[in-house]
Each structure stands twice: as structure tokens, then as C-alpha cells.
Image (cartoon, grey):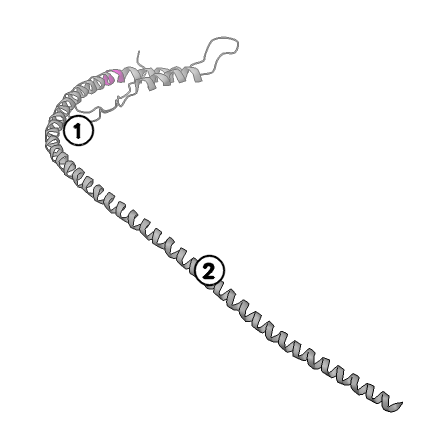
Amino acid sequence: MLRKKVSPPSANNGNHAEPSLSPPQAPAVDLDIHKEFNRVEEIVLDSPRVPFTRLTLLDEDRLLNQLDFVRLNLPEAFEKALSIIQQQEQIISQAEAYAEKLVQTAQNRAAQMLDEMAIVRRAEQEAGQVRQQIQRECEVIQQKTLAEIEQLRRAARQELEQMRQQTLAECTEIQRGADEYADAVLARIEQQLREMMQIIYNGRQQLRGNSAATNQQTH
């Protein structure tokens, strides 16, 4: 027995727009049957229990109203489910057509790509030949550069050795000149010292002679 007339949610009039080539999304059912039955379960579980028994005090009006709502909306939910199934079949059919079109487009694109690949292969071959030619030229230039660097290195070593020998010779010559100059200076000083020693000696001899003469006059 129905406790209360519950108006079901308004349904679509069945007119659906034609789906495009892109696979459309299926609409959701307005009434969630599982959710409504969960509400029935919540009414039972939320009701107070009679102490020391397995009995529960239910709100009869609330429970029956919920059951009436579910009962009244089940046919509409089934209709919507059937509508969704039909729409999904239409979507699948349309998706198959869309996929077939994609396959045809892909085949055309593949044929075009084969032609392009032939051009690319030809370009790659030419590029490979140019690359090999450039590599050979670079190797020749590198070898030539290395030979020039080695030649410059040898010339630099020879020049450095010549400069070292020349510097050693100049140092030896300078040292010999310095030794000769020092010897000449020392010889001159030695001569001057000898002359001074002779003067000193003569002076002392003269002093001794004068002293002896004075002593004789005194006696």
C-alpha cells in the first residue's frame, strides 16, 4: 500500500541530438537506485533500538515514504536505463564509423608518408655523402694542422736550444771578462800596496838613520 504519492523526477522527452563523429559521453541516470536503497537502510540503522532485544523502533511514515519514492521511480529509472543502452548502442555504432574513418585517414596518411619517406631517404643519402666528404676534409685539415703544430714545436725547441747555448756562451764570456777585470783591479791594488809598503819601508829606514845620527851627536 502506498503511503504517499511521490512525483517522480521529470524525464527527458526522448529527443536526443545526433552525436558527432567524436565519441560522445553517455548521460547519467537522474535516479540513483542504490543511493535510495541505502537511504532505506540508513532509516533502519539510524532508528533507536529496544534495549536488551533485537527490535528497532522505526519511523513508519519516513520508511514507507522512502519505499514509495523508490517504487514510483523504478519504472522511470528502467526506462532511462533502456534509453541509455540504446544511446550507448548508437554511440558504439557511431564510434565504429568514426574508427573506420580514422583507419581510412590513417591509410591515406601512411601512403603519403611512404612517398615522403622516399624523399627523406634520398635526402638522408645525400646528407650522408656530404657528411662523409666533410669528415674526410676535416681529417685532412686536422692531420695538416697537427703536422704544422709538430713542425712549429720542433722549430721552437731548436730556437730555445740555440738561445740557451748563446746565453751560456754569453754568460761564460761575461764571467771571463769579469774575472779579467777583477784580476786587473786586484793587480793594480797589489802594485799600489807594494809601492806604499816601499814608501813606508823607506820612511822607517830614514827615521832609523836620523835617530842614529842624533844619538852620536849626543855622545
Distance between the Cα atoms at labels 1 and 2? 94 Å
Is residue 114 shown left or right of residue 61?
left
Asked where in the image residue 88 lies, by quadrant, the reply is top left
Q: Residue furthest top?
A: 53
Residue ID at (63%, 74%): 190
Front residue of 140 and 11: 140
Is 76 inside the magenta-drawn segment?
yes
Q: Quadrant of the C terminus?
A: bottom right
Tell me the crowding category of disc 1: few under 14, some 14 to 19, or many 20 or more residues within 10 angstroms, Cα based.
few
Does residue 175 appear left or right of residue 148 in this picture?
right
Residue placed under numbered mark 1 in the picture: 22
Question: Outermost residue, right direction?
Answer: 219
Residue identifier under label 2:
168
Q: Nearer the viewer, residue 73 or 219?
A: 219
The residue at the point 51 percent across, 68 percent down is 177
Q: Secondary structure at mark 2?
A: helix
Q: Which of the pair 83/75 is nearer the observer? A: 83
Residue 159 to residue 15: above or below: below
Q: Tell me which amino acid carries mark 1.
A: Ser
Residue under the point 50% across and 8% down: 53
**Residue stretch rendered in magenta on the structure:** 73-77
- What residue is rendered at 46% in x and 64% in y? 170
Query: At which x and y percent is residue 141?
Result: 24, 47
Q: Nearer the viewer, mark 1 or mark 2?
A: 2
In the rendered image, residue 54, in percent from the top left (x then y), is placed at 48, 8
Give the x, y percent position of residue 114.
12, 30
Residue contact between numbered discs 1 and 2, judged by CB atoms under 8 Å: no
Q: Amino acid at mark 2?
A: Leu
- Residue 72 or 95: which is nearer the viewer? 95
How crowded is the residue under tag 2: few (<14 C-alpha within 10 Å), some, or many (20+)?
A: few
In which quadrant of the rendered view does residue 1 lie? Answer: top left
Q: Where residue 32 sits: x, y (%)?
A: 30, 20
